[in-house]
Image (cartoon, grey):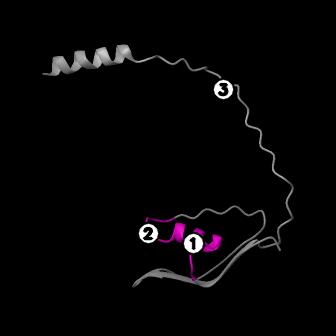
Amino acid sequence: SKTNQVTSRERMLEKLEIIQIDDVDTSALKLRFPPTQRSGDYPVTVKDVSKSYGDHAVFKDANMSIARGEKVCFVGRNGEGKSTMIKAILGEIDVEGTCSLGHN
């Protein structure tokens, strides 16, 4: 019955150890990155890139240049190729066309 379930839960909760958490996080994350080479004017270029899975063309003849310092956001519905484009730029998947990612 519900009453038995409730009392069983109450007993189980009483047995749990209560952990106290500080209100203020005093730990500091300190990251140090080594100096890098200055990137070229266009560190990411995509030329005539196409990708399809069977008969489904995710994108066809896509062209894009991302300039140094530019911020980019891929926006779209599910299945429209956002992750596929990123994987293509990183060279994780094979595509038709040219994706170049580099410094100069």
Q: Report x, y in % for residue 36.
A: 85, 60
**Residue type, label 3:** Asp
**Residue type, label 1:** Met
Q: Which of the pair 32/55 is nearer the observer?
A: 32
Q: Secondary structure at mark 1?
A: helix
- Residue located 82% across and 67% down the image: 39
Q: CA distance from mark 2 to mark 3?
A: 39 Å
User: Which residue is identified by label 3?
Assistant: 25
Q: Earlier in the sequence, mark 1 or mark 3?
A: 3
Q: Which residues are magenta?
A: 76-95
User: Which residue is identified by label 1?
Assistant: 85
Residue 55, located in which quarter of the rendered image? bottom left
- Give left or right: position of 79 versus 96: left
Tell whether label 2 touches label 1 (CB within 8 Å): no
Q: CA distance from mark 1 to mark 2?
A: 11 Å
Q: Earlier in the sequence, mark 2 or mark 3?
A: 3
User: Which residue is identified by label 2?
Assistant: 79
- Residue located 65% across and 22% down the image: 24
Q: Secondary structure at mark 3?
A: loop
Tell whether label 3 touches label 2 (CB within 8 Å): no
Q: Which mark is residue 46?
A: none
- Residue located 73% across and 32% down the image: 28
Of the 4 image quadrants, the one containing the N terminus is top left
Q: Report x, y in % for residue 6.
A: 23, 18
